[in-house]
């Protein structure tokens, strides 16, 4: 029998094909959509001269919820981008030192 060494997890993960990213998979899609809702609700309540006062609670709710989640997801995406950049820099330094 031939003894085969198990491959490290890095090699198997590196050879795994990645699926293509669609527009809804982009990390900035959700914050962008939330910022759009935030701007729309803010405009509709504060700048629209034909605003119907019976929809105040809806606009204020959408404005508050979309603002909170837009800021949260923006912070998360900035952190993830920085971590990925730092990880890539560390890997390139490790490869340059080994090579």
Image (cartoon, rainbow, N blue to C red):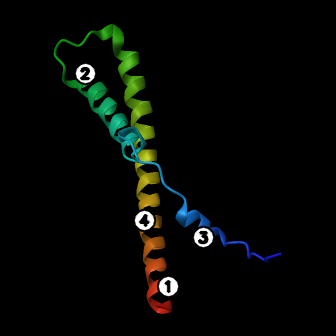
Give whichever of 34, 99 is nearer the camera.
99
Residue at the front extreme? 1
Q: Residues within 10 Å of mark 4 (few under 14, many from 20)?
A: few
- Disc 2 is placed on an element classified as helix
Rounded to the nearest whole Å, what is the CA distance between mark 4 and mark 2?
A: 35 Å
Q: Which mark is residue 44?
A: 2
Foreground: disc 2 or disc 1:
1
How many numbered marks appear? 4
Q: Residues within 10 Å of mark 1 (few under 14, many from 20)?
A: few
Residue wearing tag 3: 10
Rounded to the nearest whole Å, what is the CA distance between mark 2 and mark 3?
A: 51 Å
Q: Where does residue 56 sit, x and y in percent of width and height?
A: 35, 16
Residue wearing tag 1: 94
Residue 71 appears in which quarter of the rendering?
Answer: top left
Residue wearing tag 4: 82
Foreground: disc 1 or disc 3:
3
Q: Residue at x 39, y 38 (%)?
A: 24
Q: Residue at x 40, y 17 (%)?
A: 57
Quarter of the figure that contains the N terminus? bottom right
Q: Where does residue 82 sit, x and y in percent of width and height?
A: 42, 65
The reply to whether the C-beta atoms of the residues labelled 2 and 3 are less than 8 Å apart is no
* Mark closest to the chain's N terminus, 4 or 3: 3
Does 3 sit left or right of 91 as displayed? right
């Amino acid at each position: 029998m031939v003894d085969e060494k198990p491959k490290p997890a890095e090699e198997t993960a590196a050879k795994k094909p990645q699926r293509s990213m669609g527009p809804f998979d982009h990390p900035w899609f959700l914050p962008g959509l939330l910022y759009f809702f935030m701007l729309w609700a803010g405009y509709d309540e504060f700048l629209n001269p034909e605003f119907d006062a019976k929809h105040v609670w809806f606009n204020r709710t959408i404005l508050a919820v979309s603002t909170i989640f837009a800021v949260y997801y923006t912070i998360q995406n900035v952190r993830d981008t920085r971590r990925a950049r730092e990880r890539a820099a560390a890997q390139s330094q490790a490869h340059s030192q080994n090579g």
